[in-house]
Amino acid sequence: MRASNTSGLGYLMGCYFHQDWVCDADSWQDVIAEFVNEEPRLGLLVEAMGESSLVLAASLVDDDPKYLYDVFICEFVPRDGSTMRAWLTAVRDRIADQSYHSGRVPSTALDDVLGGLGRLEIERPTNGAVDWRPVAEQFGESAPVEEVTALLGAISFVLAPTASTSSELRKWLADVRTAIAVPAAARWPPTSHGGDGA
């Protein structure tokens, strides 16, 4: 099944990593910089990072190295011996990092993420705290995919390498992202982004 280029990840892979991408940029990192700096819709960046988390959680690039091409018509192939998993993880992290460097990430990003998780009753662990994992997993299983990808993408912003997030908070947020992404990945890709089966 081919996904349309209307999803954030589909748009990035199909429109920026097209067959002539090497003529337009010196490296994949330059392509990500162009995507972040020229794409006016911040939500598309968030969606691309969130959807990357779903693809990674479902191990789709592990099971089929050609997955990104088959689904999104992505023409990138790692030439440095790295795996598609490593590359897609680097892409997600680079979008977040480049967004920080270019001033695209709101200064309230961390507060927004923690507030959103609090509304879902996913709270940072403290002594005697209720385990947050079942709530995170339930959100991943049942929330609309668009809400899941938005939250996963927002978490990716605050996990950017240049974000000033403490190591303890960074580890917990990475665990939350995984706990939400794994059950949500079972529903990926959403049928609303599906192609014509060609």
Image (cartoon, rainbow, N blue to C red):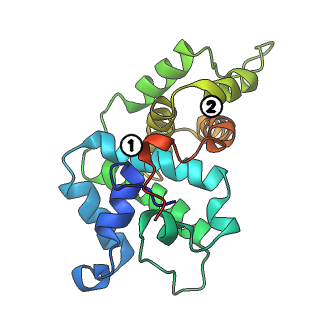
Name the residue rendered at 23%, 43% in the picture. 41
Residue where numbered disc 2 is placed? 140
Task: Give the x, y percent position of residue 94.
Answer: 42, 59
Tell me the quarter of the picture where residue 146 sits: top left
Q: Residue at x 60, y 39 (%)?
A: 177
- Cα gap from disc 2 to disc 1, whole angstroms: 17 Å
From the image, state whether disc 2 or disc 1 is nearer to you: 2
Residue 46 tag number? 1
Q: Is residue 14 above or below residue 130?
A: below
Between 64 and 1, the residue placed more toward the observer is 1
Q: Earlier in the sequence, mark 2 or mark 1?
A: 1
Seen in the picture, residue 88 relative to 51 is either above or below; the reply is below
Between 105 and 32, the one lying in front of the other is 32
Q: Is residue 68 visible?
A: yes
Q: Secondary structure at mark 1?
A: helix
Instruction: Please report the residue visible at 24 percent of the width from the left and 64 percent of the height from the top.
Output: 34
Check disc 2 and report its element: helix, strand or loop: helix
- Tag 1: amino acid: Val
**Left or right: residue 64 compared with residue 4:** right
Classify residue 33 by image quadrant: bottom left
